[in-house]
Amino acid sequence: MGSDIHDGDTGGERPAPPTGHRSGFEEHRPDTTEHRSATTLRVNGKPHTLVVDHRRALLDVLREDLGLTGAKKGCDHGQCGACTVLLDGRRVNSCLQLAVALDGCEVTTVEGLAGDGEELHPLQRAFLDRDAFQCGYCTPGQICSALGALDEAAAGHPSHVTVPATPSGRPVPLDADEIRERLSGNLCRCGAYPRIVEAVEDVVR
Amino acid sequence: MKPFGYVRAASVEEATEAFAAHPGARYLGGGTNLVDLMKLGVERPAVLVDVSRLPLDTVEELPDGSVRVGAAVRNSDLAAHPLVRDRYPALSQALLAGASGQLRNAATTGGNLLQRTRCPYFQDVSKPCNKREPGSGCGARDGVHRDHAVLGHSESCVATHPSDMAVALAALDARVELYGELGARSVPAAAFHRLPGQHPERDTEIRPGELITSVVLPAATAGLPSAYRKARDRASYAFALASVAVVLRVSDGVVAHAGIAFGALAHRPWRAQRAEEALLGGPATAAAFARAVELELAAAEPLRDNGYKVPLARNIAVDVLTRLASAAAT
């Protein structure tokens, strides 16, 4: 299930499919008896073109091929949220995303949140200030999920606990109940939930 | 996981042609259920036909006042869409009661309808399951079945359909639009899923190779008071033990329209036609609601360990009906 990495910084040309016979037609209509394909991802602002086994999940590409071990493998079934990353700006479980289907997508992992500078992202700072973790295994997923949740609320996305009469299309204010509901897809086996909610509240304010 | 081919379709026609050309093909939407089932060895496609980027990603109002939802619209976007929140609140509420924020961002409208049961025997390839392997038996009937069906089950299968969204669609009289080799057709959402009978391997009325292209929300139920309520083991991020979607119009204290569907009680969203018929034209009172719902649930045949579902479903249905009626009266 390995992948051949072709780093975007080291060469512009897209690699030939492993079958060797390359044509423009094949790039758009891949041979479906083939089990590997080229896919280009932009991860934390940097392009990577890889030839991936079709079975390879985004999480494994990030961790095994690109060395970005922030996103964690917890359940590997989309139940725990430890693998949460932002895909084209939206939070998803990277363990359930097949890399081959993500050609051209933008991925942001916890490693990309602070940008180029030394300053941590406000959510990272708040998690530290509030001591919002114990073992830390779920933390990158919690932070990426919280970031996605903040953007969703700002874009007017309601949640299960949003009062139905709340006008549609306007930002949804986030209180502790909203934060708990919106982060319910991220489990913390240490039980740091109260401080995680406080940390996110700090950033909301 | 078994190796598989992959093709990304650029059009609905191309997708159905690719499916027909490849035995063992499966359509890939958001992948939140299919990829998981592939990891479990339950699904072993030879080829994935990726339909997630088809131009079926819009919610639009049609000239007749109905709303067409493309099959590739993500669950989170559908739940947040002003047309859905304002006109079909039960649908928005049902979507938001399901899964997690991450999963709703990926899961599609079409894929939500086609998700498989979460019966643990179905998901465990070492166990017997007539749905996964016809003829192998049912582990749940005499096994762990607290979450299983109380209505419409058969000797061969006691699984429930896990979708919240589909329950709201059934109550709202939505239609599912399909495209296949024989062309386009549409099926009422309430009749899209099947009861298990002797063929639990077939979840829906979809034909081999057919693709869901959209879901149409009718003008007739637009703007009617509606709501979804879900009972579950946790306050969030859990499948339903019982759920109900209700669409109710009350005029001068009399029920003028009632659409009621239960979730997590059967192999498909359970449209409560008996209850609806009992209510139509009668008083919109808590007593009448209780009588109608009890009439519907009289058909229940609980298994050894899931009898609790019947009073649970009764209570949430009567509660939602009563609340909607009192909101309509004020």
Image: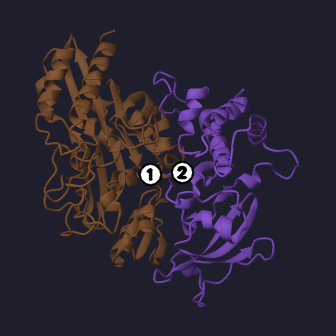
Chain colours: A purple, B brown
Q: Position of residue A10 (x, y in %)?
A: 81, 75
Q: Residues within 10 Å of mark 1 (few under 14, many from 20)?
A: many
For disc 2, the chain is A
Q: Is residue B261 above or below residue B50?
A: above
Q: Is residue A163 left or right of residue B257?
A: right
Q: Residue A80, labelled with which disc?
A: 2
| Quadrant of the image containing the C terminus of chain B | top left
**Figure quadrant of residue A195:** top right
Task: Please give the name of the residue rendered at 30% of the width and 24% of the height, measured from the top-left corner.
Answer: B320
Q: Nearer the viewer, residue B4 or A110?
A: A110
**Figure quadrant of residue B164:** top left
Q: Is residue B231 left or right of residue A127?
A: left
Tell me the distance, in whole angstroms, between the alpha carbons under discs 1 and 2.
Answer: 20 Å
The residue under label 1 is B108
> Does residue A127 appear in the picture of this structure?
yes
Q: Position of residue B87 (x, y in %)?
A: 39, 29
Question: Which amino acid, mark 1?
Answer: Thr
Q: Nearer the viewer, residue A144 or B170?
A: A144
